[in-house]
Amino acid sequence: MTRSHRNEDRGGEHRWTFNGVEYPTRKLMCEARRAEYVRLLDEEGMNFTQAAHAVGVSKRTGKAWRNGRTRATGRNEKPLVDWYRSTMDKPKTLHPRYLSQEERIQIA
């Protein structure tokens, strides 16, 4: 399981760690966490709950990262990844049994 916490016992220096890597600011640590969350979803094939717990956040935080959120101040935060925009792949070659689009247009 990944760990993240703030180390204050280093002579007054405030360092943030996540997965054994120290970050100078909390913001950079959180960005690394979010990037790892997206990587776990895409590459490892984890479900949302597993990925959230693997990086040390709640399901609710993971959902906010995926879908974006609106703050009480009215500021909108965009989602990390546009999950719903898909690119259209070229159609696969059809079995010879079926007509191609050009052949269908010719018949019509």
Image (cartoon, rainbow, N blue to C red):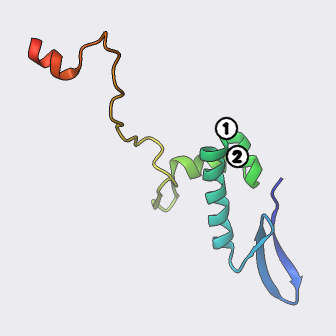
Establish if 45 lies above or below 28. above
Name the residue at 40% across, 40% down: 86
Quadrant for the C terminus in the image: top left
Crowd tier of the residue under label 1, counting other residues whose Cα lies within 10 Å: few below 14, some 14–19, many 20 or above:
few
Q: Is residue 91 visible from the viewing direction of this image?
A: yes
Q: In this view, which residue lies farthest toward the top?
A: 97
Viewer-closest of 6 and 34: 34
Residue at the image position 51 percent from the left and 51 percent from the top: 68
Residue beneath disc 1:
47
User: What residue appears at the point 52 percent right and 58 percent down from the top-left corner?
Assistant: 72
Is 72 in front, or is 31?
31
Residue 44 vs residue 4: left or right? left
Are the residues at dot 2 and dot 1 in contact (C-beta closer than 8 Å)? yes
Q: Amino acid at mark 1?
A: Asn
What count of labels does the image hold? 2
- Element at label 1: loop
Q: Which image quadrant for residue 10?
A: bottom right
The answer to whether 103 is drawn above or below residue 44 in the figure is above
- The answer to whether residue 42 is left or right of residue 87 is right
State left or right for residue 30 relative to residue 56: left
Question: Quadrant of the rendered structure where residue 41 is?
Answer: top right
Q: For the residue marked with disc 2, what is the amino acid?
A: Ala
Measured as percent of width and height from the top left, residue 1 is found at: 83, 53
Percent of width and height locating residue 84: 44, 41
| For residue 26, side relative to residue 2 (left or right) | left
The picture quadrant where one finds residue 3 is bottom right
User: Badge 2, how many Cα within 10 Å: few under 14, some, many 20+?
Assistant: many
Whole-angstrom CA distance, mark 2 to mark 1, is: 6 Å
* Disc 2 element: helix
Residue 108 visible in image:
no
Residue tagged 2: 51
Q: Position of residue 107 (x, y in %)?
A: 10, 11
